[in-house]
Amino acid sequence: LTGCKISDEASAIECMDMLHDYGIPTVIFSSTELHNADERGRLLTGYVSHRADLAAERRSNQSLEKLDMLGKKTATAQRIRITFPQLPGVFFGTGDLFSALTLAYLERDGPMPDLKVSVLRCTSTFVMGFHVCP
């Protein structure tokens, strides 16, 4: 969307900030391969960045033109990194499920969600599905 290339954690954060500059309050990169391996095998890393100020502005139905100007103001984003093992196999629909669960938990928690709690709920729900449906 931005032409921004992600090659390391710093560039991932830079790309998230570019998307925030467009007025997007929550940016999620769900499974990058920036952390290749640990003692257990291959790892995937996800990044979540949320700007509560942009979320509040969107919820108040301000015009997109005003959001464009507001998105560029200086604000601190709440950010988290998630690292998890890459499972062997081919999976279909996992990105859709992750997106739906994340949206549901973030919406439920309002314009100032605790990202760690929301993402933990999302991943816990996701993992429970794998245990219930082998």
Image (tube, rainbow, N blue to C red):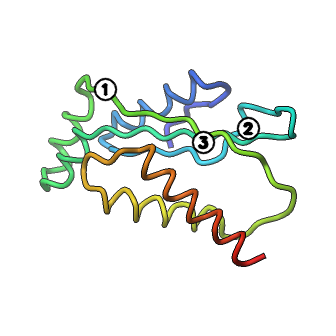
Name the kind of residue labelled 2 in the image: Glu
* 30, 64: nearer the viewer: 30
Query: Label 3 to label 2, Cα distance in Å?
Result: 9 Å
Q: Is residue 103 above or below residue 63?
A: below
Describe the element under mark 3 as helix, strand or loop. strand
**Sequence-earlier tag: 3 or 2:** 2
Q: Is residue 58 above or below residue 96?
A: above
Q: Are marks 3 and 1 in contact (CB under 8 Å)?
A: no
Q: Position of residue 104 (x, y in %)?
A: 40, 65
Q: Is residue 23 above or below residue 104?
A: above
Describe the element under mark 1 as helix, strand or loop. loop
- Specify whether 42 is left or right of 117: right
Q: Residues within 10 Å of mark 3 (few under 14, many from 20)?
A: some
Q: Which residue is mark 2?
A: 33
**Sequence-earlier tag: 3 or 1:** 3
Query: Label 3 to label 1, Cα distance in Å?
Result: 19 Å
Q: Position of residue 12 (x, y in %)?
A: 56, 30
Q: Which mark is residue 46?
A: 3
Query: Label 1 to label 2, Cα distance in Å?
Result: 26 Å
Q: Which residue is mark 1?
A: 76
Q: Which mark is residue 131?
A: none
Q: Residues within 10 Å of mark 2 (few under 14, many from 20)?
A: some
Name the kind of residue labelled 3 in the image: Gly
* 69, 96: nearer the viewer: 96
Q: Residue at x 65, y 25 (%)?
A: 8
